């Protein structure tokens, strides 16, 4: 809290939720008694729901509905029960007697209303104002009974505040109100309990200060008492950076300027009504927004000069908006068009929320409440009937189902790049902007978007300014060999990434071939195995996708860790809808060329990202190296390498002393091969990797264009895995002969894939000199050699572990973090 003179008045206002029951009254008393200020003014609203219940009495009486009597009795019983809980018996009886006198008055008013079948505003004001009288009388007695505060005095605001209603709401007669309050205050007054919401007009007739009137009362009494601070106590911890129902990661704003608070309030934020702040603003009285139910929390300070380095304080929105557009060449250079437009709307009492006009003057548009759009279009067609008939104005149209997104912050003034960040965030989230407005103060940037995209827009812009993490809605397909390791890696790092870089990786779905688990927020990664065991449902791609792609999360990514053609065949539709795809699955990029081309087109059109570094070389930067070479203008003559860790292992270990078939069986048992070793020995996997690299080079090759030497004998392609392993020893002599012939020439055997710029692609077992780069590698290493214009005499080589769950999952994880940086995160 700010430093202040302890002898000055401090005003505390408590809303209806803060005085809802006896426990709430006790909590408010604890807060007041804990204040260090010598002089405290407490402004109370009616108990929760009472004002609405009182207005219902009037409505029922107007309809001659006798149930108003029972409802009035229920209000009496509720307050009497509160008094019994809070006060000694004698005090409770006195309170009940006062209440009964009010009931008699109310009964007379409501009987008259029932006979007249109508009630004027003065009747509604009189009846609805009793709630504050009842709550403050009770609290004053309760505080007095506790005996902790000196100089207690109950103040009926009708005796001092004089308000006159005009077009802009209630106007306070300050001189009269000040003199009346001075006359009321006892010489030793130190703790005032004041009715909120109610006042009197110049004739002494009761009136109210309108909805949020108790907040206004607090500000008025803050001004009348020359208070050093005003505290508005609610049921939230302070002013939030966005609506938490739509932006779950909204944060409490530590400090706001008066202007920022007014801008946020105008655009729908639950701050404090601008009018209620006016008395405090005019006298530079700081306003605190605090939580009755968590008084230890500091809350939000609203003042003239807040100390804050955050350029954007909050992002808020107005829903159910329509955009009226007036367009025509005849408007260019013609003065008065805007005047006529807004004059016509004013005459129809249509509120204009936002205005946008291009410098060409060819069109002007404004946002209005959607409910007023039909009236607006009718009045404008009448106002510009001649210009429409003569073609000077081509159209007057209205577009509904829109929303206004407002980005507010004093720190935006003079800071380059703020608007760019707003529009980049919206563009990245695939949110279309219909209209833009920004005032000269640069305190507010407002955009009009489709109403269906409003939540997505809020989340994206909120995340873009680091008010919330960069959130990715993630679905993992295939929690098997690679997928389970990826999930474990995510579990070990997601807290650090959130803490250091504000990256929120929310795994909201995990799907296997038969079942899936979905979570509204996020599957707890530390217990993901338990989660998929407990919450499994039948696998369904459509439901999985629909769950992941929700409006309130701006970015969706599907990570396919399978080798499934079924999953790969869905990449196009996912990316066309703006979903990012990350995968080590080679099927899509090595499948039919037409499908591969369609993936690139879908990605370009939607703005989605497609990352697949782990399809070749697991975590090695094999594909990125190709891209870097091409994008920097290098000409790639050929790419060749050992692309199979399994086959690298086989021919590193095989030395002719142990039968080839025994080494294959041992590798299979160690988990170095696929469950069926023929999947590796056939060379198809290497051919797929070669096609992926060839297409990265710009070659339009199909998988069938690769000449592949399979190491699976023709007569062993069928049958079971065990039958294959049992029959493979028949070919040991053939492999031994090839090995010995190569050894005699000082060569080694290596299974090599090669593609040239001319489009020649081969996968085969080759003899290589013992000093060749491919001859001396670790057991399961991949090694890739790039021959280019720059790297011709000494080719560029990338080498390292290119197989195994850990390194493959690491490559996928790296792609996920790369995606986060593409979306604005800073690593």
Image (spheres, rainbow, N blue to C red):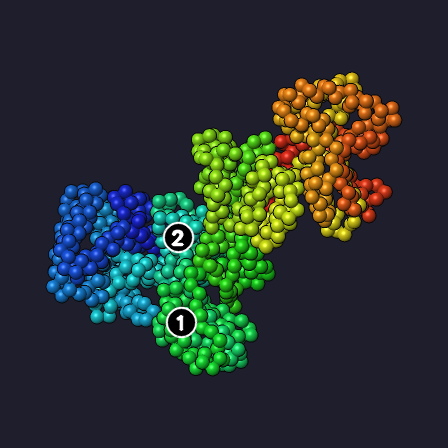
Across and down, in percent, residue 702 comes to: 69, 43
User: Nearest the camera: 333 or 463?
Assistant: 333
Q: Position of residue 54 (x, y in %)?
A: 21, 56
Of residues 249 and 644, which is closer to you in this image?
644
Could you tell me residue 151's position as x and y percent?
Answer: 26, 52
Q: Is residue 138 left or right of residue 578?
A: left
Q: Residue 81: in sight, yes or no?
A: yes
The residue pinned by badge 1 equals 377
Q: Is residue 501 visible?
A: no
Q: Mark 1 packing: few (<14 Cα in 10 Å), some, or many (20+)?
A: some
For this orientation, the residue located farthest to the right is 745
Depicted 397 relative to depicted 104: above or below? below
- Can you say whether 575 is above or below 721 in the image? below
Question: Hey, which residue is sitting farthest front in the picture?
Answer: 715
Upstream in the sequence, badge 1 or badge 2? 2
Say which element carries label 1. Answer: helix
Identify residue for label 2.
289
In the foreground, 218 or 632: 632
Which quadrant holds residue 534?
A: top left
């Amino acid at each position: 809290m700010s430093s202040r003179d302890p002898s000055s008045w401090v005003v505390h206002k408590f809303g209806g939720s803060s005085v809802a029951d006896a426990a709430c009254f006790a909590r408010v008393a604890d807060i007041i008694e804990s204040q260090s200020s010598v002089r405290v003014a407490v402004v109370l609203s009616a108990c929760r729901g009472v004002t609405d219940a009182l207005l219902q009495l009037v409505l029922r009486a107007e309809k001659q509905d006798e149930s108003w009597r029972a409802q009035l009795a229920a209000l009496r019983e509720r307050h009497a029960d509160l008094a019994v809980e809070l006060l000694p018996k004698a005090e409770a009886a006195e309170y009940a007697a006062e209440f009964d006198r009010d009931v008699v008055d109310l009964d007379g008013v409501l009987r008259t209303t029932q006979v007249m079948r109508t009630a004027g505003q003065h009747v509604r004001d009189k009846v609805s104002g009793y709630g504050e009288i009842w709550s403050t009388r009770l609290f004053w007695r309760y505080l007095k009974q506790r005996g902790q505060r000196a100089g207690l005095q109950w103040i009926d605001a009708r005796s001092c505040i004089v308000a006159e209603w005009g077009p802009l709401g209630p106007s306070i007669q300050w001189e009269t109100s000040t003199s009346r309050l001075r006359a009321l205050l006892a010489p030793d007054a130190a703790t005032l309990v004041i009715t909120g919401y109610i006042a009197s007009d110049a004739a002494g007739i009761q009136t109210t200060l309108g909805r949020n009137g108790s907040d206004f009362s607090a500000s008025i009494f803050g001004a009348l008492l020359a208070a050093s601070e005003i505290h508005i106590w609610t049921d939230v911890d302070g002013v939030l950076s966005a609506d938490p129902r739509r932006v779950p990661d909204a944060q409490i704003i530590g400090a706001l300027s008066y202007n920022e608070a007014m801008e946020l309030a105008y655009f729908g934020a639950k701050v404090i009504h601008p009018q209620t702040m006016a008395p405090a603003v005019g006298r530079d009285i700081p306003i605190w927004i605090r939580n009755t139910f968590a008084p230890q929390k500091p809350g939000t300070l609203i003042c003239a000069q807040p100390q804050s380095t955050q350029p954007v304080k909050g992002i808020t929105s107005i829903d159910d908006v329509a955009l009226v557009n007036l367009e025509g060449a005849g408007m260019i250079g013609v003065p008065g068009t805007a005047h006529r437009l807004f004059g016509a709307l004013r005459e129809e009492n249509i509120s204009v929320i936002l205005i946008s006009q291009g410098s060409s003057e060819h069109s002007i548009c404004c946002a209005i409440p959607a409910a007023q759009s039909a009236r607006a279009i009718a009045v404008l067609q009448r106002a510009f009937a001649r210009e429409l008939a003569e073609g000077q104005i081509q159209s007057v149209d209205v577009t509904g189902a829109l929303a206004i997104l407002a980005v507010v912050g004093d720190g935006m003034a003079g800071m380059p790049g703020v608007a760019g960040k707003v529009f980049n965030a919206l563009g990245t989230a695939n949110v279309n902007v219909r209209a833009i407005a920004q005032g000269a103060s640069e305190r507010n940037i407002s955009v009009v978007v489709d109403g269906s995209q409003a939540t997505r827009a809020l989340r994206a812009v909120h995340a873009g300014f680091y008010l919330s993490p960069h959130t990715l809605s993630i679905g993992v397909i295939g929690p098997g060999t690679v997928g389970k390791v990826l999930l474990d890696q995510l579990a070990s790092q997601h807290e650090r990434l959130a803490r250091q870089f504000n990256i929120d990786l929310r795994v909201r779905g995990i799907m296997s071939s038969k079942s899936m688990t979905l979570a509204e927020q996020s599957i707890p990664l530390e217990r993901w195995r338990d989660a998929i065991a407990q919450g499994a449902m039948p696998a369904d791609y459509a439901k999985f996708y629909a769950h992941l792609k929700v409006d309130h999360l701006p970015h969706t990514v599907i990570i396919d860790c399978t080798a499934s053609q079924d999953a790969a065949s869905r990449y196009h539709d996912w990316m066309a809808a703006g979903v990012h795809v990350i995968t080590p699955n080679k099927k899509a990029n090595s499948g039919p060329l037409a499908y591969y081309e369609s993936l690139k087109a879908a990605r370009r059109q939607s703005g989605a990202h497609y990352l697949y570094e782990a399809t070749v070389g697991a975590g090695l930067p094999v594909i990125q190296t190709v891209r870097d070479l091409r994008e920097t203008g290098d000409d790639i003559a050929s790419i060749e390498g050992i692309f199979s860790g399994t086959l690298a292992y086989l021919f590193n270990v095989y030395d002719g002393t142990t039968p080839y078939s025994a080494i294959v069986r041992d590798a299979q048992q160690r988990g170095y091969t696929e469950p069926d070793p023929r999947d590796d020995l056939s060379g198809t996997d290497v051919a797929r990797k070669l096609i992926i690299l060839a297409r990265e080079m710009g070659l339009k090759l199909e998988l069938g264009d690769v000449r592949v030497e399979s190491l699976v004998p023709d007569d062993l392609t069928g049958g079971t895995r065990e039958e294959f392993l049992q029959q493979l020893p028949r070919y040991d002599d053939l492999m031994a002969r090839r090995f010995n012939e190569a050894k005699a020439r000082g060569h080694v055997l290596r299974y090599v894939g090669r593609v040239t710029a001319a489009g020649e692609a081969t996968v085969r077992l080759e003899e290589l000199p013992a000093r060749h780069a491919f001859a001396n590698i670790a057991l399961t290493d991949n090694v890739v050699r790039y021959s280019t214009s720059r790297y011709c005499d000494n080719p560029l080589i990338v080498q390292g572990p290119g197989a195994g769950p850990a390194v493959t999952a690491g490559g996928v994880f790296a792609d996920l973090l790369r995606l986060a940086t593409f979306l604005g995160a800073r690593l």
